[in-house]
Image (cartoon, rainbow, N blue to C red):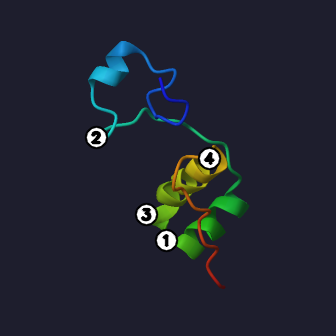
C-alpha cells in the first residue's frame, strides 16, 4: 500500500466501506482555549478540513500544501 494513502493500516472491512465517503472517527484532545479560537479563525465547520490539510502536508502527500493561516 502507498504510504501516502488513507487506507494504510486499515482493516479489509474499513477499506471495503469506501474511505472517501466515510472515515473512522478519530478523537483528538485539544484544550478548549485552543479549539474555540481555531474555530473562530477557520469557521467551526472548517476545522476538520484544515486539520486534514495540515496532516497531508506534514506527511508529504503529493501536491499537499501547508494550510494558509488566516489574518486576525
Q: Label 4, label 2: how many angstroms apart (C-alpha)?
A: 23 Å
Camera-nearest residue between 21 and 6 = 6
Disc 3 designates what residue?
45
Disc 2 designates what residue?
21
Q: Secondary structure at mark 4?
A: loop
Q: Quadrant of the C terminus?
A: bottom right
Estimate the x, y position of residue 31 in percent, counting from the top left.
71, 53
**Mark 4 neighbour class, 10 Å CA radius: few under 14, some 14 to 19, many 20 or more:** few
Q: Label 1, label 3: how many angstroms apart (C-alpha)?
A: 5 Å
Residue at 36 percent of width and 22 percent of height: 14
**Mark 1 neighbour class, 10 Å CA radius: few under 14, some 14 to 19, many 20 or more:** few
Check the image and report above or below for 8 versus 65.
above
Camera-nearest residue between 9 and 23 = 9
Disc 1 designates what residue?
43
- Circles 3 and 4, Cβ within 8 Å, touching? The answer is no
Disc 4 designates what residue?
60
Amino acid at each position: 500500500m502507498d504510504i501516502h494513502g488513507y487506507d494504510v493500516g486499515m482493516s479489509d472491512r474499513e477499506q471495503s466501506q469506501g474511505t472517501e465517503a466515510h472515515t473512522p472517527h478519530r478523537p483528538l484532545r485539544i484544550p478548549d482555549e485552543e479549539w474555540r479560537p481555531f474555530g473562530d479563525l477557520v469557521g467551526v465547520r472548517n476545522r476538520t478540513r484544515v486539520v486534514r490539510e495540515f496532516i497531508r502536508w506534514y506527511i508529504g502527500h503529493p501536491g499537499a500544501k501547508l494550510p494558509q493561516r488566516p489574518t486576525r
